[in-house]
Amino acid sequence: MLKKTLLIFCCLLFSFNAEAKKGVNIFAYSRPAPETAFYNKYGQRTTISDFKGDFVLLNFWSRHCVPCIKELDDLNNFVLKTKDTGIRVLIISKDDEWVSAREQKELLEKYRAPDLDFYIDKGGKLAGDFGIFASPHTVLINKFGDEFGRISGSVDWDDEDIIEKIYSIKVKYGEGLPHND
């Protein structure tokens, strides 16, 4: 119980007033994304490299995070508006937040986000390997499977200016060169 209360407190602490103040952080050099496994709604194992060829917005969220819940509808609209453009949105939450994939699907439907591809992060290992300890937090992955930037906090994903910004980031960085070794 204490752990859950602490998690909720941390989510609230780090998410208040985070909306777009921090903006997008683009790295000087891309870096390989962790190859830590995460799981789709059918329990199938996947990794970031399974999405090579796409520009991926990897959104870490929590059902206990108010800003995360608030942005679900906008994120769903973003997915619909950017369909077939090579942009993939994956939302990932920790496995201990859910009894089943059906429960997660029902929550997404309740908050008008039925079109989001949702995944489970067992034990928070993927978030930990990325160094993410607060949500919402979006990791930007280029078509080579390399991380090149992040967005901390919630975003008004349905805003046309934001959509245009993401398109320009995709063109400038998401199609870019593989990481430097």
Image: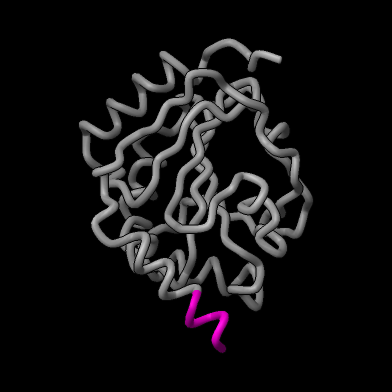
Residue lying furthest top: 177
- Residue drawn at x 30%, y 41% is 22
Viewer-closest of 91 and 109: 91
- Residue drawn at x 45%, y 57% is 135
Residue 119, horizontal then vertical, whole percent: 62, 55
Q: How many marks?
A: 0
Q: Is residue 172 above or below residue 136?
A: above
Residue 91, horizontal then vertical, whole percent: 52, 51
Task: Give the dominant element type of the magenta stretch: helix, strand or loop.
Answer: helix
Residue lying furthest bottom: 1
- Residue drawn at x 75%, y 39% is 35
- 91 relative position to 112: left or right: right
The verdict on residue 128 being magenta is no
- 38 relative position to 134: left or right: right
Toward which corner of the image does residue 150 lie, by quadrant? top left
The verdict on residue 4 being magenta is yes
Residue 117, horizontal then vertical, whole percent: 55, 50
Viewer-closest of 30 and 62: 30
Toward which corner of the image does residue 166 lie, by quadrant? top left
- 102 relative position to 165: left or right: right
Report the span colored magenta: 1-6
- Which quadrant would the N terminus be assigned to in this image? bottom right
